[in-house]
């Protein structure tokens, strides 16, 4: 018991333990500028200190070595801290343990030159860890392991290179413990070993981030193409049905004389058969909007038909010229994505509030598209400004707002999405060159 208390007391007052706990808390916390982040860091620092003190003490009593003292607290805190998804958390933990081992060697080298003692060595280790964390934050601007499709197998290369680094450090430190060879290494060899190991791990981490980003980019492009194709197919189908209705109306007008003749002859049976035939050929598509712009009318009327089928009222205001200098696929994507999202959001609100407001106005060299709808809750913004989808087949959804933003940028415009007092509003401005 005395040995336990003495070891625990030494662990508590050790500046190395404090530096390591700070490193754990920083490395395993998402530094995203959220409110009260400092409070979350403080709580995690307390947890990391306790884990380091307790597990470090056990390590010193059972198997006194810096390897186990490094691994145990990091693994324990990785299980407790949930800021990152499993692949990212595992990768961060591996990078944390290896970087700390390299920092110990760096601290030994520096301390051998300045003879500053344990506090100087702890400060060097902490500075080393902060530098590695800054490098990781910089690399993660190129990609992220937080995507839903990133699996543990995706980060195997990072885990392997980190494991090899830990094994190399273990062999270096343990060979004197087991009596194989005394621990003796030159300053240059220590620096080169640490530098090569740390650079290798960061390079592999960067490569994995780039590969994951490339995969997600291909999946995003595939989903966007699928979504655009579906929009155009729906628009073409609507146009075909609308054209059939126009032809049918023309036929009815031309055959009015024949209908009148049947009624005058009192040939009601023939008239009934004729009307039955016309009913079979009729199409339930109706023209709700007639703005003078054929493309706009087709797009808006299709969305109004969908809203009617879903039991959603639409208050529309359309004011556009007969021709717009906007590509058909772009205009269709903007209006149909926003309207589809608005109509689907109304499924979660009470029946009396199922109303979507649409404004499509060309004014002063700009096309303004404004869509608002009631929403049960504020949407969640994910990477690239996309809004998180609630659909079950999320792989092919959730990209509509991203497509709208890109189209707005293409036409030197802007796209803004906001949520206020239970109403979600999408505002898009396209410059009409």
Image (cartoon, helix red, strand yellow):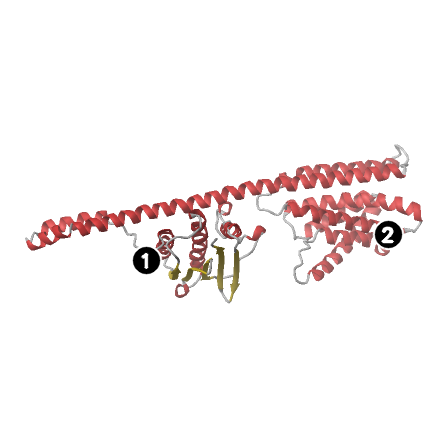
Q: Nearer the viewer, residue 198 or 45?
A: 198
Residue position marked by numbered label 2 in the rendering: 7
Task: Say which element carries label 2.
Answer: helix
Classed neighbour count for the residue bearing mark 1: other residues with Cα under 10 Å, few (<14), some (14–19), many (≥20)? some
For residue 97, which numbered disc appears in the image?
A: none
Q: Badges 2 and 1: C-beta atoms under 8 Å apart?
A: no
- Disc 1 element: loop
Tell me if residue 378 can be seen.
no
Percent x, y of residue 197? 78, 38
Instruction: Tell me if 29 is positioned left or right of 148 in this view.
Output: right
Front of the two marks 2 and 1: 1
Residue 349 visible? The answer is yes
Residue density around tag 2, few if under 14, some if 14–19, many if 20 or more, within 10 Å: some
In this view of the protein, which residue sits in the foreground, 324 or 94?
324
Q: Would residue 253 appear left or right of 285 to someone viewing this image? A: left
Residue ID at (49%, 61%): 424
| Distance of label 2 from label 1 (alpha carbons) | 81 Å
Label total for image: 2
Above or below: residue 274 compared with residue 42: above
Instruction: List the residue tagged with mark 1.
Output: 288
Q: Residue at x 77, y 43 (%)?
A: 98
Q: Which residue is most to the bottom?
A: 421
Work out whether mark 2 precedes mark 1 in sequence or the reverse, and give the earlier one.
Answer: 2
| The furthest residue to the left | 265
Compared to residue 276, the image places residue 197 above or below, namely: above
Residue 425: image x %, image y %? Answer: 49, 61
């Amino acid at each position: 018991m005395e040995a336990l208390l003495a070891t625990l007391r030494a662990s508590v007052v050790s500046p190395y333990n404090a530096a390591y706990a700070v490193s754990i808390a920083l490395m395993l916390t998402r530094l995203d500028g959220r409110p009260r982040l400092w409070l979350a860091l403080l709580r995690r620092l307390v947890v990391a200190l306790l884990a380091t003190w307790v597990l470090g003490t056990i390590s010193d009593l059972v198997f006194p070595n810096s390897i186990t003292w490094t691994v145990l607290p990091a693994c324990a805190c990785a299980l407790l801290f949930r800021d990152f998804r499993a692949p990212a958390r595992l990768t961060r933990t591996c990078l944390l343990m290896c970087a700390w081992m390299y920092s110990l060697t760096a601290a030994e080298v520096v301390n051998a030159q300045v003879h500053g003692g344990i506090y100087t060595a702890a400060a060097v280790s902490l500075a080393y860890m902060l530098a590695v964390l800054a490098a990781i934050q910089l690399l993660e601007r190129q990609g992220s392991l937080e995507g839903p499709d990133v699996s543990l197998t995706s980060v195997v290369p990072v885990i392997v290179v980190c494991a090899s680094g830990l094994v190399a450090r273990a062999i270096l430190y343990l060979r004197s413990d087991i009596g194989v060879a005394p621990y003796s290494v030159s300053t240059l060899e220590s620096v080169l070993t640490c530098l090569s190991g740390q650079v290798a791990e960061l390079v592999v981490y960067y490569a994995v981030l780039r590969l994951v980003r490339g995969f997600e980019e291909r999946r995003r492009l595939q989903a966007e193409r699928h979504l655009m194709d579906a929009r155009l197919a729906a628009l073409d189908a609507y146009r075909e049905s609308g054209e059939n209705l126009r032809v049918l109306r023309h036929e009815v007008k031309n055959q009015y004389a024949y209908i009148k003749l049947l009624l005058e002859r009192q040939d009601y049976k023939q008239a009934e058969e004729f009307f039955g035939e016309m009913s079979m050929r009729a199409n339930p598509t109706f023209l709700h909007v007639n703005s003078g712009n054929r493309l706009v009318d087709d797009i808006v009327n299709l969305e109004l038909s969908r809203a009617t089928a879903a039991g959603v009222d639409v208050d529309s205001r359309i004011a556009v010229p007969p021709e717009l200098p906007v590509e058909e696929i772009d205009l269709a994507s903007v209006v149909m994505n926003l309207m589809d999202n608005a109509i689907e959001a109304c499924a979660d609100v009470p029946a009396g509030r199922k109303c979507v407001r649409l404004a499509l106005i060309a004014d002063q060299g700009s096309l303004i598209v404004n869509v608002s709808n009631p929403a049960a809750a504020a949407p969640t913004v994910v990477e690239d400004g996309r809004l998180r989808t609630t659909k079950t087949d999320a792989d092919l959804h959730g990209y509509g707002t991203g497509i709208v933003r890109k189209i707005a940028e293409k036409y030197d415009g802007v796209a803004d999405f906001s949520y206020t007092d239970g109403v979600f509003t999408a505002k898009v401005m396209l410059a009409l060159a």
